[in-house]
Image (spheres, helix red, strand yellow):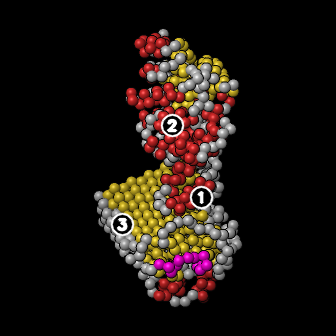
Amino acid sequence: MSEMDLKYECYEKDYELITQNSVGIANNVRSNAWAAFVESGMPVARKGNEKWKYTNVNSILEKTFRKNAKQLSSEISATSIPCGSTAHIKIVLLDGHLSDDLSSNMKAFEGITITTIQEGLDAGNANKHFAKHASLKDGFVSLNTALFNEGISVEVDSTTEPITLELLHFTTGNDGVANYPRLLVNLKENSNVTLIEGFFSNNDGEHFTDAVTEIVLDPGSRMVHSRVMLENLDSVHMGTTNVYQSSDSEFKSASFSKGSKLARNEMSILLDGPGSSCDLAGLYLTVDDQHVDNLINIDHAKPNCTSNIKYKGILDGNSRAIFGGEVIVRKDAQKTNALQSDKNLVLSDGAEIDSKPSLWIYADDVQCGHGATAGSINGDTVFYMKSRGLDERTASRFLIHAFAREIIETIDDPDFMQYLDDMYESSIPDVTLNLG
Amino acid sequence: MIEVKDLKANIEEKEILKGINLIINPGEVHAIMGPNGSGKSTLANVIAGRPEYTVTSGSVQFEKQELLALEPEDRARAGVFLAFQYPTELPGVRAWQFLKAAVDAIRVHNGDPEYTAREFDLRLKECVAEVSIDPELVKRNVNEGFSGGEKKRNEILQMTLLNPKLAILDETDSGLDIDALKIVADGVNNFRNENNAVLVVTHYQRLLNYIVPDKVHVLFDGRIVQSGGPELALELEAKGYDWVKN
């Protein structure tokens, strides 16, 4: 990529800095990843690239994004996600640096080992899974793997009681900050964890988050996962979540996005053990000129697995959202149950949704279905509400909120659900209805 | 209470109402009957303010104000209620929240404070008991997955709860079995008093056995062609609508 060197200069500088300052196995991983990134670059060429067909990441290269080499500030506005009245671990990272002051209970529970990935690699317990599931062929994964700071590695023993793990990533500082959150979670046999990943801005600047999460579920384990994307409306968020599921494991996930000017939320699930299941819900709200791209890959590699995707979008202004669902049912994956749906409420003429659920089925004894809808607020419905004394604004807010709530209510934790409900309710756009 | 004068209305350039004149006084129940396509439902919906219809002339005076100048929600707040022929499902909208918002909108319009949750709960329970509706229905989403009969009963519940000055029932009897019909009729009979008025739009005389009207009007081709007392409904039932057509 010699021609493009200049565009990637800021990333190269950060690569040089991080490899000067770290030693051991991590540096080998970083140099492999950097070589992969140098090879591929960011996925700017979209022609023939289905994965990036609707999303142009060129704008990232128009700006210089540098890491905050040191933790700048612990004075983070007290943002927290209310959740988990039971055993609860909170991990706060500022620009990828672990904040001891803001984190709590990291060593409080037996059977849960939390280290930095750097430590985990050096101690030899993160090697088995780290960077084994997220593919370095993906430019944002290789960039993250080369540049992440300490990263967080979590290992949960079989004997552990159910626990909630809250991981909050803040990008602080001024304009042009890059942040590479990296997480590895391994649930051992039959363990049970709730993981909430939250992404926030602590500045109004244009910043770049390139996040990678790898989750490895051993047989019989269960994870309830949420991904909450609330970064500021000038920011860029490229997120990749890879989940490896062994037999009889269960992964229940919900993504909530509201922030970012340009966002990508990619989830890849490999159902690699019989009897495993995943349930993926998502809610995206886009306004103004936001562009939010959701891509989900589910690979049914083994028999008797189920997958269920249920996403919903609310689009306003000149925003654009993308839903791509790619479900593959391999030849051996008999008795697969796979469902996916994406429903959209389009509130303005300027907004656009590209919804593309797809299924490739190579087994014959399966039950699969997919569907996508896009609609606006129904005039009859609004008239019914108006005829009961509600004004148009109240009526449309009722309907939009109700539309969103179907996804919000997939959250079992009542405090967390209320937090999400309040957040979306307060963000419902005021729409001008054109009811003729 | 309401005076409709020379009301003409179109839908998509087609004239449906061709000059309706109607006066309903407080304490009265009027029935509008007529064959399919005569304009009965149009009249009900034009009074409530359904946006698909264009009023081309005439006026509707309600309690000394021009109803046609008001938005549908302002008509509702002023005291007009339409029980829909096909009540709309409100996907995901919880009945309790919706009904409270509706009641509060009217209360605020009348200068009363909004209900507290507890006050509203009590009021809702009273109304649920009064119209013999399954209490589970108000815990669900508005009309979502309701049977036809449940939807109609839910309209009567809303009428009771909102306590309008003028209630218009648009073919509320259609599709109801005899038990549901009695529940609807009981709801209306409990509702009616000397200060309010009811306009019952129906195709069949059957409902009028249970809700006895003060006046019956026969609508045909966008005009009221005959008016009379309750006996007119029976005469129509006996002779059929061909009788008025000719």
Quarter of the image holding residue A60?
Answer: bottom right
The residue depicted at 42 percent of the width and 66 percent of the height is: A251
Task: Pinpoint the chain carrying mark 3.
Answer: A
Q: Could you tell me residue A97's position as x and y percent?
A: 60, 79
Is residue A4 or residue B59 the one in the foreground? B59
User: Helix, strand or loop at disc 3?
Assistant: loop
Quarter of the image holding residue B236?
Answer: top left
Is residue B61 or residue A59 the one in the foreground? B61
Q: CA distance from mark 2 to mark 1?
A: 34 Å
The residue depicted at 52 percent of the width and 78 percent of the height is: A106
Residue B60 appears left or right of A32: right
Over which residues does the magenta segment extend? A97-109
- Residue most extreme to the bottom: A24
In this rendering, does residue A61 appear at all? no
- According to the picture, the residue beneath numbered tag 3 turns out to be A276
Task: Pinpoint the chain carrying mark 1.
Answer: A
- According to the picture, the residue beneath numbered tag 2 turns out to be B127
